[in-house]
Amino acid sequence: MESMHIHILGICGTFMGGVAALAREAGHKVTGCDAGVYPPMSDQLRLLGIDLIEGFGVEQLSLKPDLFVIGNVISRSHLPDGPAKFPLMEAILDQGLPYTSGPQWLYEHVLFGRHVLAVAGTHGKTTTTSMLTWILEQSDLQPGFLVGGVPLNFGVSARLGGDTGRKLFVIEADEYDTAFFDKRSKFVHYRPRTAILNNLEFDHADIFDNLTAIERQFHHLVRTVPASGRIVVNGNQASLKRVLAMGCWSETVQFGSQNGLGWIASGTHNDFTVLYNGVAVGHVRWSLQGEHNQNNALAAIAAAQHVGVPPDAAAAALCSFQNVKRRMELRGTVAGVMVYDDFAHHPSAIETTLEGLKLSLPDVTSKKRILAVLEPRSNTMKLGTMKSQLANSLNAADLVFCHSGGLDWDPTEPLASLGSAVVVADSVDELVKQIMSKVQTDDVIVCMSNGGFGGIHAKLLSALKMKTGLN
């Protein structure tokens, strides 16, 4: 493959950052631009030697790349005072320069000719993709992968993988749209032979009108799986049953079903036997929390079997799975107070995260309390589409702290049912101040956001050290 210079617009998104890493590994020259970048992607790109440019100025045309790769953060919108929000994109269009989307570039230059294993779903995509990749790695299959996060077992979000006979590639398959000029879901480009449909709820209210619209996109993914392929589907989801009822041409296997068919788990969330149609086929003992991760494991084991990994070997591999950065990642402990960072931002994910944490704590005689610190930052949450579900999702927390900055709605009203357990603040610094006024020794603080959250984790740890006099 001939080397080229690609310039990526929106390079610090988790997907586009992964594309950049793959292109760099393949020998291409990669540069990129973005605004308001934050770790872990910015750190990964710098370590790869990829030059980052702040903003979307037209002066970047002087780089004269062979191709511009456009992330879905780019639009044709204008600022309130008139000028284009992304002047570089306008210049590319005006001058007729070559451009493509990230998913299209990925398929043409990386995925074509490989056995693609795609992981789709409203929740758990990153974790399940990482689990499946680790299973294949432990089975000496040298998979390539692109994950929307950084799996701790690998330390990077993407790699090309080995050139073995199987040429496997595992990818997190996002239903968000491809680009401003291609409104299909990203995953339509990937053409998997193995597909996981992990779950399906309403999300992305900024681009989908309702759940039916998302179900249609999931069916577009189903349509791309060949007859020799496998679709691994959550057996408890009515939405996914509707997706398959639209038409399915591949083998399907289900997991997590309450009727005992397909792949199920028996035992606690961190110590369970894997059963297939009632027969024990493996055992997983790990530190991960929650029923959602148990189901993620079942999906990964079922998908790995499709490429020849025995279930007992897959389950054994998961015993050494270390999770993903920003998935209940412990950022530090001061005076017994533990500060976690978690990516949860949809009400269902918030609920499963907190319930899983509560189950992992000692019995009710423990002094440990859960302090949930939330930034409703996703486009769906900013629109307030799911604010009515927010209070119920936080029931497992003892205290709730919500950041209201950047919202067009006031979280105080939808959280009112939680009573005095709720604090709302419009700045991160005020939120830290309020947390510090209520925190006690041995509390567990969980910061939940799909963004950087203003560096709240470091601010909390610093404030805790000052409060306790520790270094």
Image (cartoon, grey):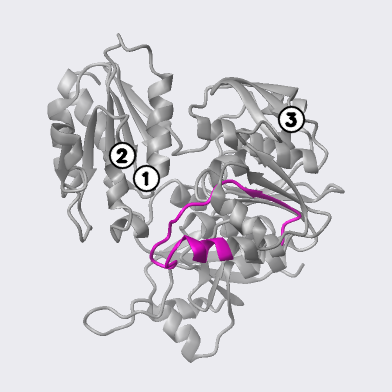
Residue 336 placement, left or right of 120: left
Give the magenta-colored segment's residue range: 191-216
Amino acid carrying label 1: it is Pro
CB under 8 Å between callouts 2 and 3?
Answer: no
Mark 1 in CB contact with mark 2 (< 8 angstroms): yes
Q: CA distance from mark 1 to mark 3?
A: 31 Å
The tag earlier along the polypeptide, 1 or 3, is: 3
> Is residue 107 toward the left or the right of residue 437 in the image?
right
x and y percentages locating residue 455 in the rendered image:
29, 43
100 horizontally vs 163: left or right: left
Q: Tell me what residue is drawn at x 70 percent, y 64 percent.
A: 223
Asked if residue 214 is among those painted magenta in the image, a careful observer would answer yes
Which residue position is annotated with label 2? 392
Residue found 47% across the figure and 91% down from its top: 94
Density class for disc 3 (Cα within 10 Å; few <14, some 14-19, many ≥20) is some
- Amino acid on which the number 2 mark rests in the picture: Asn
Q: Earlier in the sequence, mark 1 or mark 2?
A: 1
Residue located beneath label 1 in the image: 347
Examine the rendered structure and indicate whether residue 220 appears above or below residue 349: below
